[in-house]
Image (tube, rainbow, N blue to C red):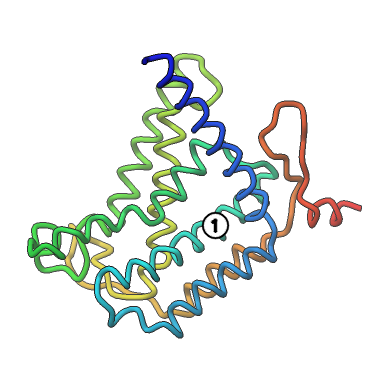
Amino acid sequence: MAAGTGINAGAASRVLNRAYRQIGGLAGKRLAGVVLACYAFATDLVSGWHGMNFAMRGLLDEPAHVATALVILGALIRWRGTLPDPRFGLMMLTCSWAVDVDHLPAEFGSYVLTDGTPRPYTHALWVVIVLTVAWAAARFRAVRSGRLRPATAELILSGTAWGVAAHFVRDIATAPMAFWWPVTGMSAEVPYWCYVAALSCCIAIPPHRLRLLRPHKPVQVPEIAAAQQ
């Protein structure tokens, strides 16, 4: 039974890694970033999801969050010239929408996370700061132990921080949030054009040499290969 479980886990890991390489290869193209950004903008400007019930809002808003994270991941890929470790990338994409589970208590009648604030307390800058500090502590311990390659804990923490931050890039432009909680519970919101500008800046980052994470077999995105010729 244990052996079978291990085989299934290994197969699932390979499938996820393969899917991540394919998604990352597409996200690294600026044209894909334009399409993803337009999808997110159209969701906000056309669908009117703000006035819908919780389930419908989720069906429309969460894919737009993933699209936003993919635009940011694509910029990171082009900047680095390599596809980040799957543990980082998959955690980033997952957390770009999963952070919205903190809305569930309010939907079931409990305001334990939203008493006096427009969105849950965990929709605030302090979450990104805590995750970043935790990553820095894990990295410091790794360096002191002489380990150069990042450990799983570091990749998961950094991916989570990037995913939550990507979520807030969209959230703070689409509705008020208590961004500075617990310093203050006052609402914070930026004009929508700031969101458009942020994604546009990400898309504008020029291509760099891109290698998918396959041992000794660099793979280039066509757009990047053409730019190098």
Task: Judge left or right: residue 87 versus residue 83.
Answer: left
Task: Judge left or right: residue 123 versus residue 92.
Answer: left
Residue 225 in the image: above or below residue 82 = below
Q: Nearer the viewer, residue 106 or 154?
A: 106
The quarter holding residue 109 reads bottom left
Local secondary structure at mark 1: helix
Name the residue that disc number 1 marks: 70
The quarter holding residue 170 reads bottom left
The quarter of the picture where the N terminus appears is top left
| Residue 175 x/y as whole percent | 31, 75
Q: Nearer the viewer, residue 18 or 85?
A: 18
Q: Residue at x 50, y 79 (%)?
A: 42
Q: Nearer the viewer, residue 24 or 179?
A: 24
Q: Residue at x 37, y 84 (%)?
A: 48
Residue 89 in the image: above or below residue 180 = above
Residue 62 in the image: above or below residue 135 = below
How many residues crowd around disc 1 within 10 Å: few (fewer than 14), some, or many (20 or more)?
Answer: many
| Residue 190 x/y as whole percent | 38, 76
Residue 97 in the image: above or below residue 35 = above
Q: Residue at x 61, y 55 (%)?
A: 74
The residue at the far right in this view is: 229
| Residue 58 x/y as whole percent | 33, 66
| Residue 141 x/y as whole percent | 40, 22
Q: Amino acid at mark 1?
A: Leu
Task: Judge left or right: residue 119 versus residue 169.
Answer: left
Q: Residue at x 70, y 44 (%)?
A: 81
What is the number of callouts on the image?
Answer: 1
